Amino acid sequence: VFKKDKKGNEWYGTDDGLYRKEKNSPAYKQFTLLGLPGTDTRNKFINGILESQHNGLWLQTDNGLFLYRYDTDAIERHVYQDYTGDPLITQDVNAMYEDPEGILWIGLWQGGLVKYDPKNKTTKNYKLEDGLPSMSVQGILGDESKGSLWLSTFNGLSRFDKKTEIFNNYSVMDGIQGTQFADGALLKTSEGLFIFGGSNGITFFNPGDIEINISPPKVFLTDLKLFNKSVLP
């Protein structure tokens, strides 16, 4: 994966760790995750980089969440051990999204959706019993205008309202490509369209066009038949 940060530096997440190429420099510097608490060969492969507006670079792997800090020029592990904060119930990270308040939202494989406050080191886990359609969250895009998250999962799409903590789930009957979505297959376009990819193609939409109608529909009687013949009451 590739990321250019706000300073113009280039970052590469590879199958052999993290590399940085500073702006106007021909040299690359390698950062390894091996040696940090609980790491193994799975941590050589970095499959996601997210630049934080507050902390540095969030790094996702199949074995944990890590943070490269600009101020220390070093990498640290998060949400892993009790003494460093609330740990994740599984360390297989599929997706990340940081909201304007600095809260990191984490999608896990077989671990649900996690709300993580890096400042206080606290987490909150959302599962099937909370309304999440699948315990495998594959991608997260934020609709900042409505304070909601759109989640691609292994059982359709879901919109999560951060304020009410209510999930609205969407299935094939609503027109999505299929039930199974792929991790890393997502995009927010410059026009504001959301795109999610899965096993049967892509689903794209404008989140602003989708409204939740909580009012029950009005019922109108248009015909009354007795013995298959219309009658006027």
Image: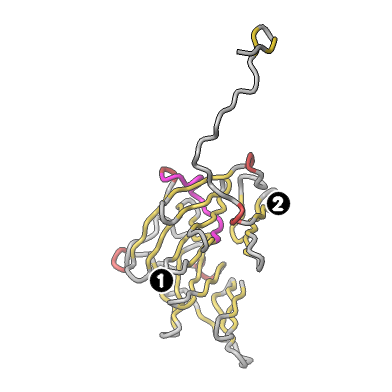
Residue most toward the front? 232
Q: Which residue is mark 2?
A: 201
Residue farthest to the left, as pictured: 83
Q: Position of residue 92 (x, y in %)?
A: 48, 59
The Cα–Cα distance between marks 1 and 2, rounded to whole angstroms, is 35 Å
Tell me which numbered mark, 1 or 2, is placed earlier along the sequence. Answer: 1
Of the numbered discs in the image, which one, if any, rests on residue 77? 1
**Relative height, residue 29 to residue 141 (above, below):** below
Q: Nearer the viewer, residue 84 or 227?
A: 227
Q: Is residue 43 above or below residue 91?
A: below
Task: Tell me the quadrant of the picture where the C terminus can be found.
Answer: top right
User: Mark 1: which amino acid?
Assistant: Arg
Dot 1 falls on a residue whose secondary structure is: strand
Q: Amino acid at mark 2?
A: Gly
Q: Secondary structure at mark 2?
A: strand
- Front residue of 8 and 64: 8
- Expressed as whole percent of the image width and height from the top left, the position of residue 20 reads 56, 83
Range covered by the magenta-colored residues: 130-141
Q: Residue at x 59, y 51 (%)?
A: 210
- x, y percent for residue 147: 48, 59
- Residue 90, x across and y down, in percent: 43, 56
What residue is drawn where x is 51% and y is 46%?
168
Q: Does residue 21 sit above or below 176 in this rendering?
A: below
Q: Give the label, 1 or 2, closer to the camera.
A: 2
Q: Tell me, yes or no, whether the highlighted magenta stretch contains residue 137.
A: yes
Give the answer, above or below, for where 85 lies relative to 154.
below
Quadrant placement of the N terminus: bottom right
Of 142 and 78, which appears nearest the observer? 142
The quarter of the displayed image where residue 186 is located: bottom right
Label 1–label 2 contact, CB within 8 A: no
